[in-house]
Image (cartoon, rainbow, N blue to C red):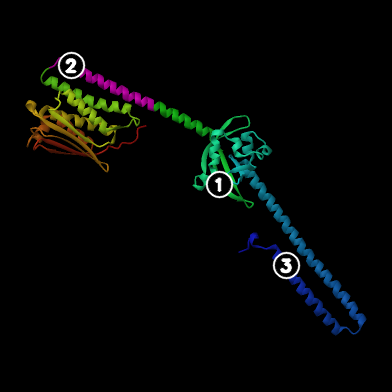
Amino acid sequence: MKKSDSQINPRFSAFRIALIYFVVSIIWIIASDQLLMLSASNTQFFTLMAMFKGSLFVILTAILIYFLVYRNLVSIKHSEQDLKESEKKFRGIFNNVNDMVSLNLMTSEGLPGKFLEVNEVGCKRLGYTKEELLNMSPADIVTPDNRQKMLNADQLLKKGRNTFEMVQVAKDGGKIPVEVNSHIIDYEGDLVFLAVARDITERKKSEKKLKNSLEEKIVLLREIHHRVKNNLQIISSLFSLQSNYADGDSKDILMASQSRVKSMSMVYEQLYQSQDLTHINFKKYVENFVHNLFYFYGAEKGVIEPIIDVEDIEIGLDTAIPLGLIINELVTNSLKHAFPEGRKGKIEISLKNDGGLFVLKISDNGVGMPGKLELEIKDSLGLQLVDSLVSQLDGELEMNGEDGVEFKIIFRELKYKARI
């Protein structure tokens, strides 16, 4: 594995070569002189051989120096060419990337200072020349209300949040929303900010269109809930008017139908008033609806007492409507049959959520129906409806007719695929 350039010490390498050359030269001079002294027969011959030896040493040294210098110069030339090609490639990428890329000095306060480098895309986008931008800082090209984000840039980086949005201002005053991704890097021994600013104008336009479209759909959905509620109230009013011309069983049937429609109408009324538009606060719904039922069936205050213990939970439309109808049927059944001849008592409604498993209990302390519940279900349209609605909720129904009546329904909220 070759050593990297950063691991080579030029001064040490030059010293090592010079030392080797010095040692070899001394050995050559001493050894060659000794040989000449031993072999030379006279002074003239010694002088001639010494001159020849010196000339040969100079020639060999010159040749060696030539090749060493030539090799180094070729290596330097190749390095310069490689560096130029590398810089050319970098410049091409740097200037032609679709985003504005810039390097900024870091001030003593750790904030972005003047531009050190800006690519051509940034210059064209902002309408400034490169020379103009190099005399400016990021704070000079953003709106005043976005300058605080520049001040908080170092804090965001420390927290690991290096991406944020801001609005840049072009030379002609045009505003350009951008998403900035910044980093702190080491540049020639100094810490600088490297920022990549992406133009998100089209994305912002798409987001605005999407937001407007969503708001329109919310208004439309709210209006649909409102109209459904109004139509159900009209149907309820028609049942009420028709009941004035009926008597006996017909009147009871119309009143039961009216309360069923009312239970659905109140769901849509609460959906219309809700911010969610898909879920309602079921505690609020039960309290309003049960008190409405007591008034509808003329339950005297102080004679039959409603006790409501419902958790503050949100329930979707698909579950709320069948659940509201179940409560309507069971509370109505208690109001009509549990307390004959002015008998006092109470009707309890509770709903608990145990990790997604809901338990609804509706009970009264009225006359009860020992041993007759199964028969009652077969003979009563309301209880048949309850049984059917419990099945719709994929729930379980438990009944007890001793010491009053208690219905216990265990179910989970229905989960349907999102509507398109």
Residue pointed to by mark 3: 15
Residue 159, numbered label? none
The local crowd at label 1, few if under 14, some if 14 to 19, many if 20 or more residues have their Cα within 10 Å, is some
Residue at the (20%, 24%) spot, across then down: 259
Residue pointed to by mark 1: 183
Disc 1 and disc 2: Cα gap in Å?
76 Å
The local crowd at label 3, few if under 14, some if 14 to 19, many if 20 or more residues have their Cα within 10 Å, is few
Disc 3 and disc 1: Cα gap in Å?
42 Å
Residue at the (55%, 41%) spot, across then down: 151
Q: Residue furthest top?
A: 245
Q: Dot 2 lies on which element?
A: helix
Provide the residue span drawn in magenta: 218-246
Q: Dot 3 lies on which element?
A: helix
Coordinates of residue 337 in the picture (x, y in percent)? 10, 28
Disc with the residue nearer the chain's start (3 vs 1): 3
Residue pointed to by mark 2: 242
Q: Amino acid at mark 2?
A: Gln
Q: Dot 1 lies on which element?
A: strand
Which label sits in the foreground, 2 or 3?
3
- The answer to whether 239 is drawn above or below residue 182 in the figure is above
Coordinates of residue 325 in the picture (x, y in percent)? 21, 30
The local crowd at label 2, few if under 14, some if 14 to 19, many if 20 or more residues have their Cα within 10 Å, is some
Residue 5: image quadrant is bottom right
Q: Amino acid at mark 3?
A: Phe
Disc with the residue nearer the chain's start (1 vs 2): 1
Task: Inspect the magenta stretch and tell me whether residue 247 lies in it.
Answer: no
